Every structure is written in structure tokens, then in C-alpha cells.
Amino acid sequence: MKQNQQHLKDVSTVRILMLGDRGVGKTSLTNLLASSEITPTPASRTVGEGSWNVQVRLHEYPNLMDLPPTPSWTSPSSSERSDKFPDPPFAPSGSDTLYFVEFYDLNSDLRMRREQRDNFYKNIDGIVLVYNLQDLRSQDNLHDWLYDPLRQICKHRHRRMRPILRRQHVPILVVGTRLDKLRLRPLRRVGGIAHQLAADEILLNCLDPESFADRSRNQGKLRGFLNRVVEFKELFPLSPTRRP
Ligand SMILES: Nc1nc2c(ncn2[C@@H]2O[C@H](COP(=O)(O)OP(=O)(O)OP(=O)(O)O)[C@@H](O)[C@H]2O)c(=O)[nH]1
Ligand SMILES: [Mg+2]
């Protein structure tokens, strides 16, 4: 990891929701996504048990990447700045900004009350949709999994009642598991959910620790996704007045 002046107490957290049918590989995938040199074992990076199995890792957001201008960026002068117009979150300091990334993997055996779940969804900054490549129904079911979280995110982050899937929706990564069980690598399915959402897709074997090896394509897609998740959090913060 590069030298970083940031104190850990200043590190913000982004939250990623793992969604998919029972047994598709959500927990196995979370183990891979959250694994890093400094937290090699699940125990060392698990921060919550109960309805959600939560694992955490660090992500370095590259500050050289410019965000598109938004109203909060073009606040006219410092005297007119208020909480509504904070300083740009990504001042080009040249060094990376650290973020904690929490992966929320639903424990299928436990049920959560709807209001509890909805209340949780509005804090989500990114979604990983997981399906089993050997069972394409598990891909079709992702539409149902996505509906409630997307509705809450749109309502509380975009202030829109209807899900918006065309512009700047919450970052989504689609992952097909059990690639090791297929004889041929499948082609990207036109009409598949990744295609419909214009989302990146990764096909992998969740049991292979090399699936996100350094400088691999999968690692590149994961980094790109985590960067978009950070940008979503900064551009569409939860309204302070609505915070619980
Ligand atoms: N061969 C192979 N097995 C996998 C893969 N991904 C997951 N599995 C296996 O599939 C089973 C279910 O995986 P989990 O990661 O527990 O799935 P889950 O989605 O968390 O399941 P629930 O929490 O019950 O909803 C486990 O036995 C895993 O070892 C994969 O890519 N290849
Ligand atoms: Mg699980």
C-alpha cells in the first residue's frame, strides 16, 4: 500500500450489498472480494454477525481521476459555501484517498423485518448481483432481488420515487459463479441482466483465490466498480435531515 497521510479516523465507509439466490456463492464471493494482504482470514475482516455477515476491506480511491462537475462542485465562493455546498470531496491532492468498503451478505437463514431492511438499503452505495452460471434462473431472479433496494436508494439518494436505471444509478457489478463447472466460457448474454443494466460482469470460480489476482482483468473490473461506488457515495449522499 502506498504512503498515505490519512488518519484512519477520517476514513469514510462505503457499503456494498451482495444479492442473489440461496447458495449461488455470495459468501464465497464476499470472502474473495474482502480478502487483502492485511486481512487474510475471514475472522480478521468480519465486522458484524446476525442478519448480515459483514466483511470489510480498504480501498484506495485514485484522486487523479476527475469527477464530472456537479452543483456541489461549482459552489460559487467560499463565503457562500454551506453544508449544502461542501468543498469538493476529491480535491486533487495527488495521493489516494482511503475508504473502508463493507460488504453486506445476507444470512439466508435469518429473516429481517421489511422496515428494517428498507431502512438499511438507503445507505447502500453499490450492489453486487450474484448468480450461478449453471442455473440461469438464478440470473433471472436478480431482477426481483434488485427491486426493493433500488427503490429505496432512488427514493433517498436521488429523491426519485421511480427506479431510474438509465442515468447514474447506483453502481452495480454482476458476477456469475461456478465458472469451473462449465466446459466452455459462456458468451456475454445479450438480454442478460448485466447487458440490460449496462453493468460490468465477472465470471469466476469463487473457490479459486487467484480469481482476483494482481493485474488481472477481474481485479481491474473490481477496482473500477469500487471507484464508482466511492463516487456514488460522494455525489449522492444520504440527506442529513433524513439520517436516522
Ligand atoms: N465449484 C464451485 N463451487 C462454488 C462456487 N461458488 C460457491 N461454491 C460452493 O457453493 C456452495 C454455496 O456457496 P455460498 O458461498 O455459501 O453461497 P451463498 O450464496 O452464500 O449461500 P446462502 O448464504 O445459503 O444464500 C458452497 O459449498 C461453495 O463452496 C464456484 O464458483 N465454484
Ligand atoms: Mg451465504
Image: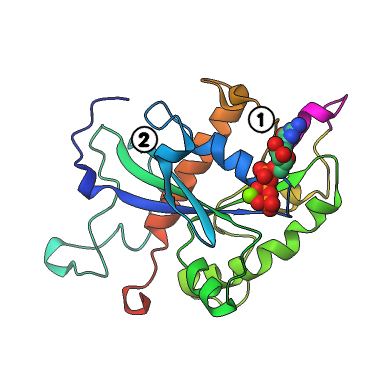
Mark 1, secondary structure of its residue: loop
Q: Amino acid at mark 1?
A: Leu
Q: Which of these two is toward me, 97 or 92?
A: 97
- What is the crowding at mark 1: few (fewer than 14 residues within 10 Å), some, or many (at least 20)? some
**Horizontal side of residue 88 vs 148, given as left or right:** left
Judging by the rendered image, the residue that carries numbered circle 2 is: 62
- Magenta stretch, overall SS: loop
Percent coordinates x, y for residue 212 in the rendering: 57, 27
Percent coordinates x, y for residue 239 in the rendering: 37, 73
Would you say the beta carbon of the disc 1 residue lies within 8 angstroms of ligand 1? yes
- Say which mark, if any, is on residue 228: none
Query: Looking at the image, which is closer to me, 121 or 186?
Result: 121
Residue type for callout 2: Pro
Indicate whether 164 appears above or below 7. below
Read off the magenta span. Answer: 177-186
x%, y% of residue 179? 77, 31
Q: Earlier in the sequence, mark 1 or mark 2?
A: 2
| Residue 198 appears in the rendering | no
Left-right relation of 95 to 185: left
Residue at label 1?
A: 207
- Specify the quadrant of the image occupied by residue 40: top left
